[in-house]
Image: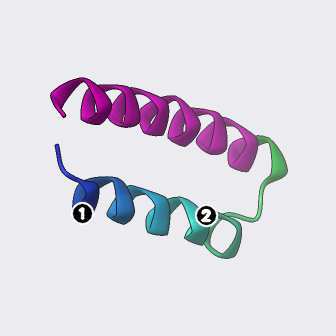
Amino acid sequence: MTAKTIDKVQKLHAMVPRLVKDPILESDINKSFNRVLAIYLRLFQEKE
């Protein structure tokens, strides 16, 4: 897990509103991305 991986996930997360037009689906996707980012950040910090 590197900062580069976290950056890629954040960039993909930023694209969600442009790719998904259903607000319920977008909300679920955002929750999932936020959960994944929190896990990545925690793992990245533990690794340092």
Tell me the residue that label 1 is attached to.
4
| Relative side of 22 to 7, left or right | right
Give how far apart the Cα atoms at labels 2 and 1 are: 19 Å
Q: Residue at x 52, y 42 (%)?
A: 33
Q: Give the range drawn in magenta.
A: 25-48
| Numbered marks: total | 2
Label 1 Cα neighbours within 10 Å, binned few <14 / some 14-19 / many ≥20:
few
Tag 2 near tag 1, CB within 8 Å:
no
Is residue 35 within the magenta segment?
A: yes
Residue 15 against residue 32 in the figure, above or below = below
Where residue 28 appears, as percent x and y from the top left, is 67, 36
Residue type beneath disc 2: Val
Residue 16: numbered disc: 2
- Location of the N terminus (image quadrant): top left
Q: Is residue 38 magenta?
A: yes
* Mark 2 or mark 1, whichever is nearer to me: 1
Q: What element carries label 1?
A: helix
Question: Which residue is more in the foreground, 1 or 15?
Answer: 1
Q: In which quarter of the image is residue 47?
A: top left
Which SS does the magenta portion mostly show? helix
Hey, which quadrant is residue 8 in on the image? bottom left
Amino acid type, label 1: Lys
What x and y, as percent, mark residue 43?
Answer: 27, 27
* Above or below, 5 relative to 37: below
